[in-house]
Image (cartoon, coloured by chain):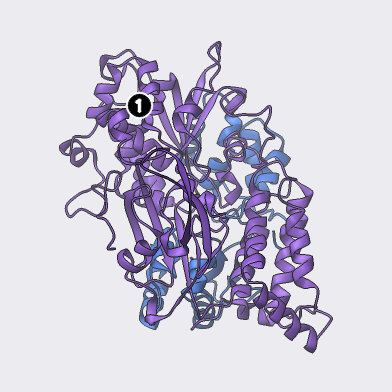
Amino acid sequence: MSAAAPITLSKKEIEIPADFIAEVDAIIARYPVSKRSASLMLLHAWQDRFGYITQQAVEWVAAKLELQPVNIYELVTFYPMFRLEKFGRTHIRVCRTLSCALAGSYELHKKFCEKTNAQGDPHGPMHSPDGEYTIEFVECLAACGSAPVCMVGDQLFESVKTDEQICNCLKHGA
Amino acid sequence: MTAPKETRLILEHVDQPGYTTDIDCYLRHGGYEQLRKALTMQRADIINEVKTSGLRGRGGAGFGCGLKWSFIPPTNTKPVYLICNADESEPGTFKDRQIIHKDPHQLIEGMIIACYANNAHLAYIYIRGEFPLGAKILNRALDEARAHNFLGKNILGSGFDCEIYVHRGAGAYICGEETGLIESLEGKRPYPRIKPPYFPAVFGLYMSPTIVNNVETLCNVKHIIRMGGAEYAKLGKPNNTGTRILCVSGDVNKPGYYEFEVGSLTLGQLIHDVCGGIRNGNRLKAVIPGGSSAKVLRAGEKYKIKEKQSDGTLADKEITLEDIPMDFDTLAAVGSMAGSGGVIVMDHTRDMVEVLANINEFYAHESCGQCTPCREGSLWMKKITHRLTHGQGVANDPAVLKSVADNIAGRTICAFGEACAWPTQSFLAKFPEEFEQAAKMASAVNGSPKVDHSKAHDSAVALA
């Protein structure tokens, strides 16, 4: 748990497209015993589609699952992968944990930050001023044999050590 | 003595040239034949075969799989659920990733057999959120299995219905704890439940009997059906049967995943032969043998173990770190554990205070915060090791660190308490001089810690 600033949810409202509703209904159908079980998957679906979790997201998901908004909000504030702010177009997660640290992941994180000019507290997501990149230290990504590793979007990059490999990661998102 | 050859049972097709994740490839390699066979067997017979096989859970605790399955009350009338724990996140472990990404149907076949044996009609694969491609691969594989009627209604005309869905986590390590996982799958914060009474086999998902098994464990079920429990039990050693995927990372020349019969090779053979020795010709300093929660072992230590003689009696034997056979019982006997199979190797250039500082930061981040000793203790330990590595400690820091760790273990709802205390306890016990030195140096400079955020980057484990 990090000592973050007080959490506020963005009020930004968006029109919910019909295909998103269909996608969400298909997810809910996988939980025939309890709709509440779908809450993590719905938050993932929202974040994948709209970028981050807003007040509208919390209220919409809660209503969809016939829950109180707090039942969803408490998930958003607990699970590290849900974000309450807009991230850069390319999200780079650098593994911080032991095997990667032994192989130089702190150096790697630093280089990503320098190359993208990402700003902020290294214990949380750091954003480049142009909105292109978000660099984030995360815990073990389960690829310790090819440390240091990072994820660019959904893609895993292994043994990222040279400047050329770092540039490849940055280009992958572009 | 050179290392024995790998026995690739689970990883047989992983990384094989031309082997793909689609069902046609899997079928060409004898896929789903064991499901056909299992569907002709009696449920009790399958459970007995798994019991006979001696298969122990591959997730960390090493609990007997057949025994776990037999805990469902015989008088049960509620639906039974099966959950595959694919929340692989124990630092140092990366075996389930290989199975999911490279041979997903093996897992699915094992799961359907396990569902049939336990009469479960609904199963979930709880995959960690950081495996988005793994989730896609599994979803595609499940669609293929449905299209071939290996899933769905009346599977292959057997009258058995079964459905499996993928459920994604969202970055919380605690979801690997089975009751925390169940809470998470119910759509809540993953606060682990207290046992008793909440044993999953009795009060699991939706308060119904639930079996939670690791990815590698479920894959083994398929091979037990193929070989028969007795034949499977010939692999490995008594009470430590089958194969084990060992994940090696850290300061070795050839890190990676290797599959061996349990206990067939020693830690020394694994490091020096299989993994090509310590990098840069350095000397071995320490090994964490079963994921970062396992207690650290120090090179040069001697351990007393009991060894079975040919006449069946037990005799005392003294062994070194390099002599330890990689099985559940011996690793427990030398004061650590086989855990999740994640072996992290450190050479003589590493500062053990910095290594522990890194581990403590992980546990402080991942404590769910439900129990006070763990929530406060993990953070406190992290703060102490952070200041010790930043020249800001005080003389009694090692003593306070020990006292905090000693007061977490055994005082929490789930095993995370032990998992976060064991590294601190073992690092302090095995490398006391490094902690004393760090505290002495720090307190000579500065008795009052102050946090400098601009230096947060410097808390890296020193690079040689």
User: Which one is in front, B13 or B329?
Assistant: B329
Name which quarter of the figure residue B279 lies in: bottom left
Residue A7 in sight from this viewpoint: no
Residue B268 percent across, percent down from the top left: 39, 64
Q: Secondary structure at mark 1?
A: helix
Residue B306 percent across, percent down from the top left: 49, 48
- List the residue tagged with mark 1: B113
Name which quarter of the figure residue B34 lies in: top left
Q: Residue at x 54, y 79 (%)?
A: A110
Chain letter, colour purple: B
Name which quarter of the figure residue B161 lies in: top left
- How many residues crowd mark 1 within 10 Å: few (<14), some (14–19), many (20+)? many
Residue B447 to residue B301: above or below: below
Q: Is residue B420 left or right of residue B146?
A: right
Looking at the picture, which amino acid does disc 1 mark? Answer: Ile
User: Which one is in front, A43 or B356?
Assistant: B356
- Chain holding disc 1: B
Q: Residue at x 60, y 23 (%)?
A: B202
